[in-house]
Amino acid sequence: MSEPGLWIIDPETSEERYVLYSELEAETIRGLIKPVGGFVFSADLFMRANLPTVPFYVENWLPRRGRCLIYAPAKTGKSYLCLQLSRCVGVGEPFLGLTTVQGTVLYTQFELGEEILRRRLLETGREYSNVWVGTTFSMKLDSEVGQRQLRTAMSAVEPAVLILDPWYKTLRGDENEATDVIRILDFLDELIESFDCSLVIIHHAGKDLSKRGRGSSVLEDWVDSYIQMTRTGTHDETLRVKLKPIFLRHAPLPNEPIEAELRNFEFELTNRTSTVKEQVFRFIESANKVVSCSELFSAGIGSNTSVYEALKSLVAESVIEKVRRGEYKKRT
């Protein structure tokens, strides 16, 4: 197969001649890479486009022009996590061990008032370079007025990363209805394309964590990364969480979830990864009730086999007791 190229008019001889792409300078190639029909490129030229060398704003989680969704039950520290993510991307600092690429962030909060949001920013004692924040209770993205409001903010800030926290407050329709959800997703696609940005959505989990985020499944289908955030300990005042990717469209799944605890109003990685046995005991202890195996599996603690082995060991050590088949509680 011959090497690709194009026909040009030689400026010296005024004659047509065939030039290989490999013979052209990078500046010339950039000038040739222009879309036809609005958005279509020659594949030969497109492969030579000078695209960004780092495709993620947050390693493996947030692709450039991509969509990441983080879902969690209530009182898990989602908003603290958002502020930390905003700050880390704003300064290009690692986020819970994940590398980031520096970019301007627009964090839009739909639940917290200005006073509470300001207090949380001040509590950390950190600088928030390249981060813009805003609170609104009324902006609905399935309405023309709400879409116009967000476009205005986007035009003013021109963020690399837009964070919406939380999802259910962005729509006045039904989060369970696919048509209502798609209306917003189509609008968000327009924003991503218009502003060349990436998007993070913060979402609530349903009562049954095994069913993942609440509402229509089209939201899950739409995102590139789907991250589960769960609380792993409530027996003291320390907030401990686990961040487990359910799927990553553009990266392999990690072998282990990220485990962290809230210290000085930001999450820090724990010094070591808890064993499955420790996590099972912590879950049963903090629940303060009879816990079923299905609840342990839904929490994503480990494989079914490793959870059963942990339960067997804890029963043998007399720290938990088996109530009935598949159900356990802390021994008193």
Image: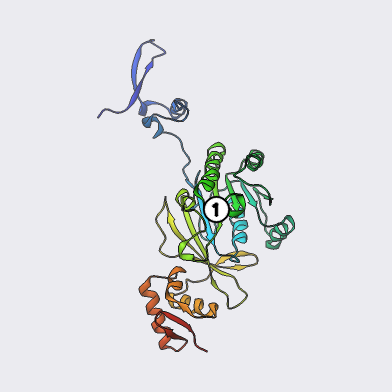
Which secondary structure lies at badge 1?
loop
Q: Is residue 74 visible?
A: yes
Tell me which corner region of the image, top left, top right, bottom left or bottom right, holds residue 79. Answer: bottom right
Looking at this view, name the residue that lies furthest to the top. Answer: 14
Tell me which corner region of the image, top left, top right, bottom left or bottom right, holds residue 126. Answer: bottom right
Task: Give the residue pinned by disc 1.
Answer: 175
- Residue 190 in the image, given as x and y percentages of width and height: 54, 38
Q: Residue at x 34, y 16 (%)?
A: 17
Q: Is residue 90 visible?
A: no
- Residue 229 in the image, given as x and y percentages of width and height: 52, 63
Image quadrant where one finds the N terminus: top left
Closest to the observer: 21 or 313?
313
Closest to the observer: 7 or 172?
172
Residue 166 against residue 149 in the figure, above or below: below
- Residue 29 in the image, given as x and y percentages of width and height: 43, 28
Give the residue type that dot 1 points to. Glu
